[in-house]
C-alpha cells in the first residue's frame, strides 16, 4: 500500500521545474543527434536512444516533448522545434490504418499544437488552426475504421494484432476520436453512411470497461477488483468473448503495470472530457449519466488497486504484479521499490502514467486521497534514482521497461535484470505530469488534451 505524508504542492512544483529544465536540454540534444531515417526512438541502450521497428508508436512523443517544454517555459525555440518536426514527419501517422495508436502519435503533436493555439499560447492564425483541425479529423476517422463488432451490441477499436484483439492501451488513444467528434467530424463509410465518432468512442469505452477491467464479481478465479487484462480476445466469427491474454505482461491472470496505467489515466482523462461536453450530445446514446458512471467506476477501481496492492510502498510498481521473481523480494509491497534488485525490473513509466491518472481523478472528483497519491508518486519520480540528471544520458526517466517477455530491454553489465534505461513514452509522460503540476501550482487552467 502506498504510504503518503501530507504533500506540499509547491515543493513538488519546484521539482517539476527541474524536470522541465533537464528535458529541455535532452530534447534539443536528441534532435541534433537522431537520424530520422532510423524511424522513431523507442528506448535507450547504455543511455543512447535506439529504434525498435514495430509500429513507430513513439514518434508523437518525440515531437510532443518540445511542445510540452514550450507550454511550461514559453521558449519559442521549442515551439518551433515541435511544430517543424510535426509537419515534416507526422503526416504519415495521420492515415496509418495499421495501428491503434492515433491518440498517442497525433494528439501528442497536432493535438498539442491546436490546444496551445486555442489557449492563446500560440499567436492566432486561422490557416494554422485549420491545418491542425484537418489533421485531427483525418486521424480520428482512420482510427475509428479499425472496428470489430461483438455479440453484446457494442464494438471496439481493435489492436494491431487483428480484429479479435482488444488492447487496454487503446483506451487512452481514444482521445483521438474525442477530438474528432468535438471538431464536428464523422466517419464516412460505404454508400455515404455517416458514422458517429462519439458513438464508436463510447462503445469502445463500454467494451473496455466490461472485458478489460475486473470488479470482483467472480468473473474468474483471479477476479480482484481493479485488476486489468492487457488483451481481451473475441471470436471474430460471432463476436463472443473468449478469454484474457497478454502480450507484454507476465500472464493473462496477472496485471501488467503499464497496461493498468493506460486504463487508469485514460478513464480519468475521458471522464474530464465527457463532463466538458453538452449533455445533449449523448441523448442518442442513452444519456450521459451511464457514460459518466462507466468511466468513473473504471477509474476508481483501478486507482484503488494501484494504491492498495499493485505497487511498492513509494508508489512505484514492478513491471507486473505476477512476475515470478517478486517472490524472492520479501514484502515487496511494504517497502520502496528497488530498481537495482536482481529479480524483477521496476517500470517507472507505468508510475508516471498512473500518477497523472490519480492526479486527474483526484482533482475531478475532489478526492484528496487520489490527488495526494498522484503528487506523492510524482515527487518520487521527480528525483533520483528515477530522474536522469546526467546530460550524457539521452533519457529523462530512468528504470522504464518496454517488453520484458520478449527480452527487448537492456540489462547492464553486472546486472541480472533491466535497469537504468529510459523510454520515449516514459519521458513524455513524466513531462506531462510535470506540466500538470506546474499549471496547478501556478493556478493556470488545467492541462487537458482538449484544452
Image (cartoon, rainbow, N blue to C red):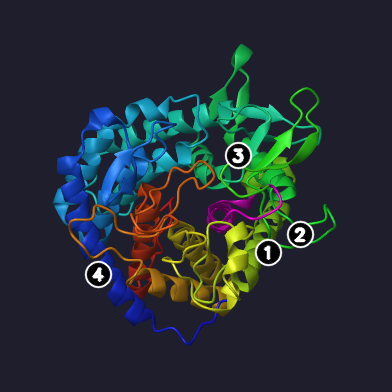
Left or right position of 91 against 136: left
Magenta run includes residue 254: yes
Residue under label 2, please give it: 215
**Mark toward the start of the polypeptide (2 vs 4):** 4
- Does 389 appear in magenta? no
Whether residue 277 is visible here, answered yes or no, is: no
State the image coordinates of residue 189 (x, y, percent, origin top left). Answer: 59, 18
Pinpoint residue 241: horizontal percent, then vertical percent: 78, 37
Q: Earlier in the sequence, mark 3 or mark 1?
A: 3
**SS category of the residue bearing label 2:** loop
Q: Please say if the residues under marks 2 and 1 sit with CB atoms less than 8 Å apart.
A: yes
Q: What residue sits right under mark 1 in the picture? A: 301
Magenta stretch bounds: 252-279
Give how far apart the Cα atoms at labels 2 and 1 are. Answer: 7 Å
Percent from the top left, x then y, of residue 95? 43, 24
Residue visible at 54% across and 44% down?
Answer: 405
Q: Which of pointers 3 and 2 indicates the residue nearer the eye?
A: 2
Q: Nearer the viewer, mark 3 or mark 4?
A: 4
Mark 3: few/some/many CA within 10 Å (<14, 14-19, 20+): many
- The Cα–Cα distance between marks 3 and 2, rounded to whole angstroms, is 25 Å
Q: Residue furthest bottom?
A: 6
Amino acid at each position: 500500500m502506498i504510504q503518503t505524508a501530507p504533500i506540499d504542492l509547491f515543493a513538488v512544483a519546484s521539482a517539476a521545474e527541474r524536470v522541465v529544465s533537464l528535458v529541455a536540454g535532452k530534447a534539443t540534444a536528441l534532435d541534433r543527434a537522431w537520424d530520422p531515417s532510423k524511424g522513431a526512438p523507442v528506448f535507450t541502450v547504455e543511455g543512447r536512444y535506439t529504434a525498435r521497428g514495430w509500429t513507430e508508436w513513439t514518434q508523437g512523443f518525440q515531437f510532443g516533448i518540445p511542445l510540452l517544454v514550450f507550454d511550461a517555459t514559453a521558449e519559442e525555440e521549442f515551439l518551433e522545434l515541435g511544430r517543424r518536426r510535426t509537419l515534416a514527419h507526422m503526416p504519415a501517422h495521420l492515415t496509418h490504418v495499421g495501428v491503434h495508436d492515433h491518440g498517442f502519435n497525433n494528439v501528442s503533436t497536432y493535438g498539442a499544437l491546436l490546444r496551445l493555439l486555442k489557449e492563446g499560447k500560440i499567436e492566432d492564425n486561422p490557416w494554422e488552426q485549420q491545418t491542425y483541425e484537418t489533421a485531427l479529423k483525418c486521424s480520428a476517422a482512420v482510427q475509428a475504421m479499425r472496428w470489430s463488432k461483438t455479440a453484446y451490441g457494442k464494438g471496439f477499436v481493435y489492436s494491431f494484432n487483428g480484429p479479435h484483439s482488444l488492447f487496454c492501451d487503446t483506451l487512452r488513444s481514444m482521445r483521438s476520436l474525442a477530438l474528432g467528434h468535438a471538431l464536428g467530424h464523422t466517419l464516412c463509410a460505404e454508400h455515404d453512411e455517416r458514422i458517429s465518432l462519439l458513438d464508436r468512442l463510447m462503445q469502445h469505452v463500454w467494451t473496455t470497461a466490461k472485458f478489460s477491467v475486473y470488479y470482483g464479481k467472480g468473473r474468474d478465479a483471479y477476479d480482484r477488483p481493479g485488476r486489468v487484462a492487457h488483451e481481451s480476445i473475441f471470436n471474430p466469427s460471432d463476436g463472443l468473448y473468449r478469454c484474457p491474454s497478454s502480450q507484454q505482461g507476465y500472464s493473462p491472470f496477472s496485471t501488467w503495470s503499464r497496461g493498468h496505467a493506460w486504463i487508469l489515466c485514460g478513464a480519468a482523462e475521458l471522464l474530464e472530457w465527457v463532463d466538458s461536453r453538452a449533455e445533449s450530445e449523448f441523448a442518442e446514446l442513452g444519456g450521459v449519466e451511464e457514460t459518466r458512471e462507466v468511466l468513473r467506476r473504471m477509474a476508481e477501481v483501478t486507482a484503488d488497486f494501484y494504491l492498495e496492492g499493485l505497487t511498492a510502498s513509494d508508489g512505484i510498481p514492478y513491471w507486473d504484479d505476477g512476475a515470478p521473481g517478486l517472490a524472492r523480494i520479501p514484502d515487496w509491497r511494504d517497502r520502496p521499490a528497488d530498481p537495482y534488485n536482481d529479480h524483477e525490473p521496476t517500470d517507472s513509466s507505468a508510475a508516471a502514467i498512473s500518477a497523472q491518472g490519480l492526479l486527474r481523478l483526484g482533482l475531478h472528483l475532489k478526492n484528496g486521497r487520489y490527488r495526494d497519491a498522484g503528487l506523492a508518486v510524482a515527487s518520487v519520480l521527480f528525483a533520483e534514482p528515477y530522474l536522469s540528471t546526467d546530460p550524457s544520458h539521452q533519457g529523462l526517466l530512468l528504470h522504464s521497461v518496454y517488453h520484458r517477455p520478449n527480452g527487448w530491454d537492456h540489462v547492464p553489465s553486472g546486472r541480472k535484470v533491466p535497469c537504468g534505461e529510459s523510454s520515449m513514452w516514459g519521458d513524455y509522460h513524466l513531462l506531462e505530469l510535470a506540466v500538470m503540476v506546474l499549471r496547478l501550482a501556478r493556478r493556470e487552467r488545467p492541462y487537458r488534451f482538449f484544452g
